[in-house]
Image (cartoon, grey):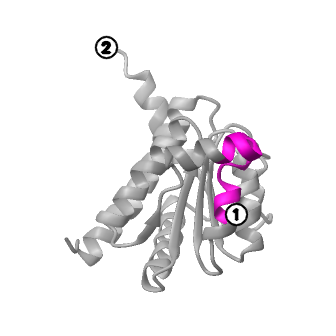
Amino acid sequence: MDNQYIRNLIETLEDTEIWQGNGADAKCAGYDEGIKILVEMFTRHKINQSQLFFLGNGGSSAIASHMTADYMKNGGMNTYSLYDNAVTTCIGNDYGYEYIFSRPMEFLVREGDLAVAISSSGNSVNIINAIEIARIKKADVITFTGFHSGNRAKQLGDINVYVPCKKYGIVESIHNLILQQIVDLIMERDGVKL
């Protein structure tokens, strides 16, 4: 059996970039430094008991939903799911799909909260709208993107994780892996309070 897919996944993970902001000197020196910065950001929000919002479309919505549960249960953080069917369909119907995250966030997000935007393309209008609301509300933003390095979401976060690949499966797998690594590190450090 040829393990080219796994080799490609590992190579892409090794090439994944983590940025603090988007300036020319904002790129972390390596993966370990980037993970450290991400763990520090999530830890600060845990200590401050901030609300965490994970959001994404399609496969990224499954990652967002999964992480909403894991960061609450295993990470001991205050997470909020934006995936209630009635609310999502109501907002989509009344305002349009491009506002399914940003309209609820106008009511729910407070200064000092954290929005984690997961988007393979980094250009989904509903994700960009949600990031803009988070910025207006003075919440922190972490983006997880892929495909093209100039995508819109990657330009808007306080920390930006960029997977240099145009394959959904690879990008989504790496997003999930990094988010899982962060919560596992926090859980190993702090333990789980059940």
Residue 10, placed above or below residue 35: above
Could you tell me which residue is drawn at 73 percent across and 45 percent down?
94
Q: Is residue 101 above or below residue 89?
A: below
Identify residue type, mark 2. Met
Name the residue at 41% across, 29% down: 6
Under circle 2, the secondary element is loop
In-front residue for pair 123/178:
123
* Residue at 54% across, 64% down: 34
Gap in Å between the C-alphas at discs 2 and 1? Answer: 40 Å
The magenta region covers 91-105
Instruction: Give the amino acid type for the residue marked by disc 1 in the picture.
Output: Gly
Comparing 26 with 115, the one in front is 115
The quadrant of the picture occupied by the C terminus is bottom left
Mark 2 or mark 1: which is in front? 1
Q: Which of the two residues, 111 or 169, is positioned nearer the viewer here?
A: 111
Task: Answer few, some or many: residues within 10 Å of disc 1's Cα (few below 14, many 20 plus, some between 14 and 19).
Answer: many
Q: Which residue sits furthest bottom?
A: 48
Q: Earlier in the sequence, mark 2 or mark 1?
A: 2
Residue 17 visible in the current orientation: yes
Residue at the far left in the pictured view:
194
Q: Residue 1 got which mark? A: 2
Q: Position of residue 74 (x, y in %)?
A: 29, 65
In the image, residue 71 above or below residue 122: below
- Left or right of 1 in this view: 145: right
In terms of image quadrants, where is residue 110?
Answer: bottom right
**Tag 1 residue:** 157
Would residue 65 appear left or right of 184 to someone viewing this image?
right
Q: Position of residue 61 (x, y in %)?
A: 52, 43
